[in-house]
Image (cartoon, helix red, strand yellow):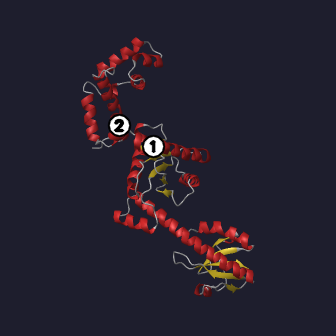
Amino acid sequence: MSNRLYQGMLPRLADTAKRCIGTVDEEGNVFACSEAARVGETRKEDISGVFLTNEPLIIGANAFCRVDNQSGTSMALFVQGDDDHALQSAAFCAAALSCVEEFAGERYDRLNFIKNVILDNILPGDIYLRTRELHFNNEVPRAVLLIRSVDGNTEGVFSATQTLFPDKAKDFVVNISETDIALVKELRSGTMEGRDLEKLARSIADAVSPQYETQPHIGIGTTVSTIQDLAASFKEAQVSLEVGKVFDTEKKIISYDYLGIARLIYQLPKRLCGMFLQEVFKRGTIDSLDEETLFTIQKFFENNLNVSETSRRLFVHRNTLVYRLEKIKKLTGLDLREFDDAIVFKVALMVKKYLDARPIRY
């Protein structure tokens, strides 16, 4: 168990016992204490006898008691004083720490198990055995949300996410890398869909942004029904972030369920994409289109190929827009007023954006 957890518990125990309480290793080094300034001290008493019995002992001016822990390392607790109250407090507090050790050990085992599952570091047969050992409900719907800290402040994002999801028996916040944190969220059966998960992700972003002055990017995997499938949901959350980085840079929350054609293009071989562009733009490359023309095309698509509405939004005469569309047809051979040509051009623009982000290397 981490020293930080001990350091958080001992002041509370000290308030109850009305005495200074600390923990030491076999050499007498104090690694946690209700009086924080004493952490790092080395006790001068010979406390070797403490580790040979389960009973508390008075040694010098303190009561000592061995703490049984899951890791098997030798540690003891001391309470200031040489009276019966110190002995009773030492026995009580040592038992309390042992119970916390047992709970924390199972908690961290569950967390490590979930981390190994989503990273695909465990065999399918072992997943089944571990779910039984750790008393997991294997058939509860869950989804993985991947939270990426743009400025590298993962500690702050991790803390905020844990605060939002305090039920550590059902929801797991896992450190993945120096920029990524995964949230494995247990969902109530049949009550949460893709849009609900986006709302959940938005609540995380809203909690993180004001406090830590960072806007995280969040990728959402699909909901899965078994623990074995969590690795797939995690990979989908990763793909969501990568696809969003290429095709929709302004969006901070991207769901795998709503990637659409961008997901298909992202999974195509780059050489095939290059061949597609060459086939579409036989008369000239897409790079021959200037910024004004590309902006016009974007607005034309946004207004569902409606010439009148697009010209109104662009504050240009209808004939001016028609002239620009004719110019595009002359350069590319594609008439964007025709539905089939518009589809081909739209896909070509997305393919071009994909290749710009991931160029072909020869």
Percent coordinates x, y for residue 312 in the rendering: 46, 16
Q: Nearer the viewer, mark 1 or mark 2?
A: 1
Percent coordinates x, y for residue 23 in the rendering: 63, 75
Q: Nearer the viewer, residue 294 or 72?
A: 72
Residue 194: mark: 1
For image coordinates 45% across by 46% down, the residue present is 219
Cα–Cα gap, marks 1 and 2: 17 Å
| 303 sits to left or right of 3 | left
Q: Amino acid at mark 2?
A: Ile
Q: Secondary structure at mark 1?
A: helix
Q: Nearer the viewer, residue 124 or 46?
A: 124
Q: Amino acid at mark 1?
A: Gly
Q: Nearer the viewer, residue 269 or 123?
A: 123
Residue 228 occupies which quadrant of the picture? bottom left
For image coordinates 32% across by 28% down, the residue present is 343
Task: Specify the quadrant that holds the N terminus.
Answer: bottom right
| 24 sits to left or right of 169 | right
Residue 96 visible to the viewer:
yes
